[in-house]
Amino acid sequence: MTGIGNRKEDHINICMNESITPEHCYWDDVKLVHEALPELDMEDIDTGARVLGKRLSYPFIVTAITGGFPGAERINGNIAEACSRLGIGMGVGSQRASLEGEERRSFEVVKEHDVPLVLANVGAPQLIPQQGKPAFDEGMLDDAMEMVGADALAVHLNFLQEVVQPEGDTRSAGCYDRIREVCRGRKVVAKETGAGISRSTAERLRGAGVAAIDVAGMGGTSFSAVELHRARSVGDGARESIGSSFFDWGIPAPVSVAWADVGVPVIASGGVRNGLHVAKALSLGACCAGAANLVLREATESADAVEERLMRVMSELKAAMMLTGAKDIEQMSSRRSVITGKCKEWM
Ligand SMILES: Cc1cc2nc3c(=O)[nH]c(=O)nc-3n(C[C@H](O)[C@H](O)[C@H](O)COP(=O)(O)O)c2cc1C
């Protein structure tokens, strides 16, 4: 297995066994206004939504987690099976290792399931040359999409991780122009990986022609924390210290959802842990929500475990819709939310 495959396996192990999220839950700062007289029946609530042109049974995507090492086949297979049964979207993790000639099966397994919305995944740093390594060309990007039968290509913006990780790709000049080129003829989702997207960056991404923005804001998985643990395990004190200093770096996810609402569909993620968080995200302007860490442990177990977890999210979303008097996702999106606490300070 290559360095990349090892790294992807490290990420799974660290996220399952170490503390990698800030203590504060920023979604708790957002409150929905209770409706004491909803005048609708729970069974009539319709959670169906259109996301990136695809019909989902509720507005949710299991966002990028993994791929590129043999153990990842089971994880992506379990997620794909559960998402296909439930009728929701999924992304795969960075396809870099496979595009560079390594293991592909862990990505191809997604095609064996009828997932209504599939996102391929490459990193923005790999769209430009890095320290003697050439940039991914158009053929490689098409290959990434074909490998998973993708409806759209997620381009992740993970510079927090790159500056903290021991072997990080730290060149970023030129990424914007490349993203603009990649958007020609493809549906691109620009996604962060846990540090959020500001309004001005969202506006620039809109200018580049992206089809959606996944804010992946601060408050959930912290890649600074993940890389801190990796640096510690190899005795790299300097990197460990950077990881620790930047543990909660970023824009809180709910704030980023509100800021990134600039006329391009927004996917709300970063610390989303239940269906109430999904309802809050919709009220802040998101077209759907997403989460990675939420299903990670279950994905290592079975498709049934992933499905059960995600069913719970749907039930909680329905409960929030009932209690705000929203009979469908459009009405849920128009419900008022009150911003309190740390998020209020940000906004
Ligand atoms: C183990 C793990 C691996 C991840 N790998 C990727 C990746 O390869 N590409 C990517 O775009 N995001 C990756 N992410 C980031 C997630 O897609 C998501 O943006 C982020 O974790 C925030 O969501 P969460 O708080 O629900 O985990 C990964 C997340 C986890 C937990």
Image (cartoon, grey):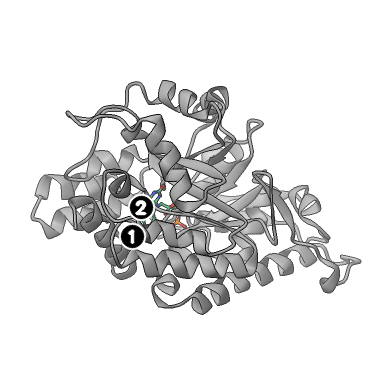
> Residue reaching furthest left?
235
Q: Amino acid at mark 2?
A: Ser
Measured as percent of width and height from the top left, residue 21 is found at 38, 59
Decide: marks 1, 2 in contact (CB < 8 A)? Answer: yes
Tell me the distance, in whole angstroms, between the alpha carbons under discs 1 and 2.
Answer: 6 Å
Q: Is mark 1 within 8 Å of ligand 1?
A: yes
Q: In this figure, which residue is indicated by the disc labeled 2? A: 222
Using the image, determine if residue 294 lies above or below residue 334: below
> Foreground: 88 or 41?
88
Quarter of the image with the N terminus in it: bottom left
Measured as percent of width and height from the top left, residue 68 is found at 31, 56
> Foreground: 146 or 68?
146
Question: Can residue 302 be seen?
Answer: yes
- The residue at 37%/61% (across/down) is 106
With 154 as the anchor, is 321 left or right in this view?
right
With 335 as the anchor, is 155 left or right in this view?
left
Q: Amino acid at mark 1?
A: Ile
Q: What is the crowding at mark 1: few (fewer than 14 residues within 10 Å), some, or many (at least 20)? A: many
- The residue at 28%/48% (across/down) is 97
Using the image, determine if residue 266 lies above or below residue 327: above
Q: In this figure, which residue is indicated by the disc labeled 1? A: 20
Measured as percent of width and height from the top left, residue 117 is found at 59, 53
- The residue at 83%/60% (across/down) is 327
